[in-house]
Structure formats: C-alpha cells, structure tokens
Image (spheres, rainbow, N blue to C red):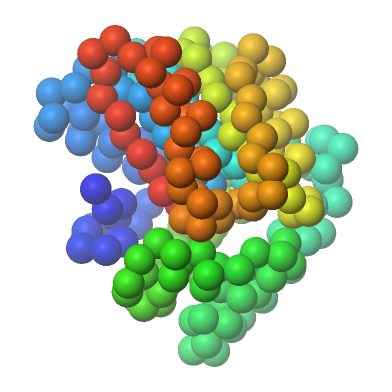
C-alpha cells in the first residue's frame, strides 16, 4: 500500500502514531492477526512505533537502518550527528520553499554521501518524478516527525518479537549510530551487515538485501502476513 500522501493515497499526513494506526487498520481489513514487519529508514521507525503500541500484532521485526531518535542521539556517543542532520534538514526546507524540490533532496542526502537519484532510478521508471510530486508530504508533513521523534529503551520494552537489525558497511556516519541504537533497544537482536552496500541498497541491490531478511522471516513464520514499509 502507499502511505498517506504518497503515490495514489490521499489523506492528511501525520506522525508515526497515525501511520501505525493505518497499518493496524490494513491488517484488520486483510483479517491478519499478526504480521512480520520489514521497515526501511523512516519505515523502520514507523515499524518500531507500531511494535511498541501493538505488540500483539507483530510476529517479527526486520529493521533496516532507522534514524535514531534525536533524544537518543543527544545522550549517546553519536551526538555530533545532530550537527549534520539539523543543518541538512534546514537546507532541505530552504531549497524546497525556494521551489527547488530536487535540490531539497540533494541537501538532505549529500552530507551523508547518498545518491537519491540513482536509488530512485533503480526502483523503477517514474520513481524520480513521483518523488518530486510527493515532496510536499515529506517536507511539509513528515520531516518534523523525524526530527521530533522520541524513542528509546522505555518505548521498546513492550516489544517481545524477534528482531533483525540490517545495516550497510559504508562510510555514512549514520550507519554505526543506527546499529548502536538498535543494539541498545534490543540486545538480543540478530544482525546482518551488507558489505559494499549503502542505505539505498534496498533499490540498487535488492536481492542482497532481501536474502537474509527472507531467511529470518522464514524461521519465524507461523501463519503470519508480511508487511513491508518503505521510507
């Protein structure tokens, strides 16, 4: 499905709590009691919120590099990342308000060395154009949710499902922070590191990303559905 404000889905944008409610409504509509959740980037953040709020609906969690919450970063050894992320978000908003939507994405991803165009082109025809069309949803509605997200061990204590932490071995400074974040939340988690990949390997090398996730899910499958949450 397309989340609120993306693709062909309408409706007002909302925070992660609203997104989690939407997923539960989808599970109810499909008559699925429990599902395996696979979330990438912002999708992993939404999956974490859903699993904490509705733990009885989650069979397992595969989390692909969620952005650690600002509150966690501030108290961690990775606090200097806030000095990268804050200006990047501010620059993104500034270029978006100036009418340079593509440049807004450049401002967000270039500080961590990510090529969003290559990732979007690898995802399929028209994805770059769709990303431009969907920019209002992200910049005007969801970016603030990422910055204001407050999540830590206290929120994760209700989660008792198996957890897989997926990460890429790249020079992106966010990657080790994401792994440390998930380790603190779930010391018992399984971990997979993709050598030579990056945050956007989900589109540029999908088979390499999917293989360990499929193996993880298969070990924890018992009449459960699979819900994948993209950023």
In the visual, does 191 lie left or right of 55?
right
Q: Quadrant of residue 93?
A: bottom right
Q: Is residue 16 visible?
A: no
In the depicted structure, whether residue 10 falls above or below residue 42? below
Query: For the point 41% across and 21% down, which residue is it?
Result: 217
Visible in this render: residue 101?
yes
Give residue 109's position: percent from left, percent from top. 64, 66
- Point out residue 11 in the picture as x, y percentages from the top left corner: 23, 58
State the residue at coordinates (37%, 51%): 14
The front one of 209 and 76 is: 209
Rendered view: 172 above or below 185 = below
x%, y% of residue 152? 64, 28
Q: Quadrant of residue 17?
A: top left
Residue 113 placement (x, y as % from top left): 71, 65
- Quarter holding residue 107: bottom right
Q: Residue at x 87, y 37 (%)?
A: 77
User: How many labels were placed on the picture?
Assistant: 0
**Residue shown at 31%/61% (left/top)?**
6
């Amino acid at each position: 499905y397309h989340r609120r404000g993306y693709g062909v889905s309408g409706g007002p944008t909302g925070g992660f709590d609203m997104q989690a409610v939407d997923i539960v409504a989808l599970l109810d509509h499909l008559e699925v009691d429990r599902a395996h959740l696979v979330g990438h980037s912002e999708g992993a953040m939404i999956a974490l919120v859903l699993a904490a709020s509705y733990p009885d609906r989650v069979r397992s969690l595969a989390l692909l590099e969620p952005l650690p919450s600002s509150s966690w970063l501030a108290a961690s050894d990775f606090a200097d990342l806030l000095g990268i992320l804050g200006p990047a978000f501010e620059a993104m908003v500034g270029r978006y308000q100036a009418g340079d939507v593509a440049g807004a994405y450049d401002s967000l991803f270039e500080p961590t060395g990510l090529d969003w165009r290559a990732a979007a082109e690898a995802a399929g025809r028209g994805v770059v154009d769709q990303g431009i069309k969907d920019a209002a949803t992200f910049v005007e509605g969801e970016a603030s949710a990422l910055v204001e997200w407050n999540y830590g061990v206290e929120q994760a204590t209700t989660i008792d499902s198996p957890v897989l932490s997926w990460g890429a071995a790249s020079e992106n400074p966010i990657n080790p922070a994401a792994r440390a974040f998930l380790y603190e939340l779930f010391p018992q988690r399984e971990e997979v590191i993709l050598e030579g990949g990056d945050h956007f390997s989900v589109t540029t090398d999908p088979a390499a990303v999917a293989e360990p996730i499929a193996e993880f899910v298969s070990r924890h499958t018992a009449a459960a559905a699979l819900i994948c949450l993209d950023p």
